[in-house]
Amino acid sequence: MDMVNVDFEWFDPQPDVDFHGLKTLLRQLFDIDAQLFDLSALADLILSQPLLGSTVKVDGNETDPYAFLTVLNLSTHKDKPVIQQLTQYLSKQATKRGGDIAKVLPQLLAPENDAQVGLILTERFINMPHEIVPPMYTMLQEEIQWALEEKEPYNFTHYLILSKTYSEVESSLRTDDQPASKKKKGGGGVEPETFYFHPEDEVLHRHAVAWSNFEYETPVDAGASDSKRAFQEMGVSSKGHIILLEADKFAGAVDAVKEFLNGAQ
């Protein structure tokens, strides 16, 4: 096996060069529901706070990011249409899922609520090493602390992390040596196993108030899962994922993520 050495560099978001790269990563994060949001406005909003959040690049500051992480104050930006879209969307998904997430998140995101919810948006190309994640979270913590010392509006009560998961589904394609499988009779009702695009999500769950998968709203055709084949025999069905943490649990959650990812092989 050939090994390729790559040097990763961390940068502040760059308004002059990162717009298109951020849009690409946001489109990947929101998957098939990306069309529901004004991603240009969302990228502009991220770039309007260049001292908060970070990008990861490999060929210098003037190139497109391979990963990013940032936080947006949903209360401060509540009058912006794209934040209204996001808030309504996330509240709707939580309500549809039921359970603990439905009990707490819609109430927190209600316009009349005084909670300061920081929406953490983070995405990376699928082949990026997980070791890039702990430094991004560490820098975010430091930047929030610096912003608070400057009396800026980042005194969050909660953090809401938007992410993605997937499940494997039986392929609808047939190979030369594999006949089409018959549909199973009966059964049903058992949720397929969840896999994580971001392995740190499972660690964050342990510190969360609530978390949940959710189905995307945009309809897909029957062969969509086969366009994301993880293995030869299986297709991939993506889902949205949300994790809600109280602010006083955030530091402990980040420490656990560092320990897990830096120790994972």
Image (cartoon, rainbow, N blue to C red):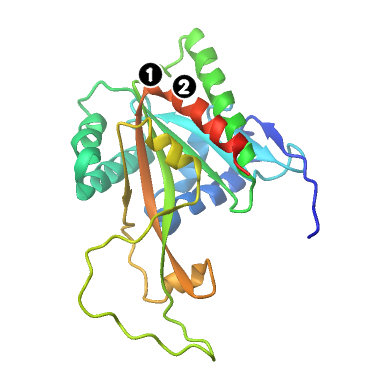
- In the rendered image, the vertical position of residue 91 relative to residue 11, given as above or below: below
Q: Which residue is mark 1?
A: 248
Callout 2: SS: helix
Q: Position of residue 111 (x, y in %)?
A: 23, 29
In the rendered image, which quarter is residue 34 located in? bottom left
Q: How many marks?
A: 2
Q: Residue at (73%, 36%) from the top-left corner?
A: 61
Local packing at callout 2 (Cα closer than 10 Å; few below 14, some 14-19, many 20+) is: some
Q: Quadrant of the N terminus?
A: bottom right
In the rendered image, which quarter is residue 55 located in? top right
Q: Residue at (29%, 60%) from the top-left corner?
A: 191
Q: Quadrant of the C terminus?
A: top right
Q: Which mark is residue 123?
A: none
Type of the residue with mark 1:
Asp
Q: Position of residue 37 (x, y in %)?
A: 39, 49
Image position of 103 (left or right of 219): left
Q: Position of residue 145 (x, y in %)?
A: 51, 14
- In the rendered image, the vertical position of residue 203 relative to residue 181, given as above or below: above
Q: Which mark is residue 251?
A: 2
Determine if residue 123 is in view. Answer: yes
- In the rendered image, the vertical position of residue 234 relative to residue 112, given as above or below: below
Type of the residue with mark 2:
Ala
188 and 84: which one is in front?
188
Q: Residue at (45%, 90%) from the top-left corner?
A: 179
- Asked if the residue at tag 1 contacts the one at tag 2, i.e. Cβ–Cβ closer than 8 Å, the answer is yes
Local packing at callout 1 (Cα closer than 10 Å; few below 14, some 14-19, many 20+) is: few
